[in-house]
Image: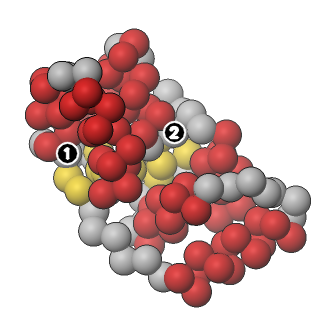
């Protein structure tokens, strides 16, 4: 399965070397993806820290275009609120919707992504 790699995983990978084996497998099998939101979350901090190798690594990952379906976003947010799932960031919902649209899973350790993936039927990879 193809996975959108969430910013929390990229950050742990870059700063702590976590998930190296899992990331390597996704790269080798061409199953790793990102999107402009995740890049916007990760690259500015990496630039500040002059992590040029990491930024170069990110540039080699397939980047999905965002085709935001705002009606679907509203429905996802409504259903989450109705189920007692609140305080979700809009960007997390957009990332989850992108995974759903592209029939992909999400590689994330973020609690919000865990809640969203369960609610939306998206496969979640955590290691």
Say what secondary structure mark 1 lies in: loop
Location of residue 68 with respect to 65 vertically, above or below: below
The scheme the figure's colours follow is secondary structure
Q: Is residue 5 visible?
A: no
Which residue is found at the position 34% from the left and 70% from the top? Answer: 66
Query: Image check: 7 left or right of 40?
Result: right
Q: Is residue 17 visible?
A: yes
Query: Image check: 122 left or right of 25?
Result: right
Q: Residue furthest front?
A: 48
**Along the polypeptide, which appears first: circle 1 or circle 2?**
1
Which residue is found at the position 50% from the left and 65% from the top? Answer: 94
Image mark for residue 108: 2
Percent coordinates x, y for residue 31 in the rendering = 28, 47
Q: Quadrant of residue 54?
A: top left
Percent coordinates x, y for residue 116 in the rendering = 65, 56
Q: Residue furthest top?
A: 16
Q: Quadrant of residue 114?
A: top right
Percent coordinates x, y for residue 43 in the rendering = 27, 39
Find out whether the residues at labels 1 and 2 contact each other: C-beta distance under 8 Å.
Answer: no
Which residue is found at the position 62% from the left and 56% from the top? Answer: 89
Image mark for residue 36: none
Image mark for residue 61: 1
Say what secondary structure mark 2 lies in: loop
């Amino acid at each position: 399965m193809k996975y959108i790699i969430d910013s929390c995983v990229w950050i742990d990978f870059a700063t702590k070397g976590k998930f190296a084996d899992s990331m390597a497998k996704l790269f080798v099998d061409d199953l790793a993806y990102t999107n402009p939101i995740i890049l916007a979350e990760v690259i500015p901090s990496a630039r500040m820290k002059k992590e040029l190798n990491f930024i170069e690594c990110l540039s080699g990952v397939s980047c999905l275009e965002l085709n935001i379906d705002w009606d679907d976003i509203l429905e996802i947010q409504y259903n989450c609120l109705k189920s007692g799932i609140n305080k979700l960031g809009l960007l997390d919902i957009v990332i989850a919707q992108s995974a759903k649209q592209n029939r992909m899973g999400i590689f994330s350790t973020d609690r919000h992504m865990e809640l969203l993936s369960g609610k939306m039927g998206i496969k979640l990879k955590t290691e």
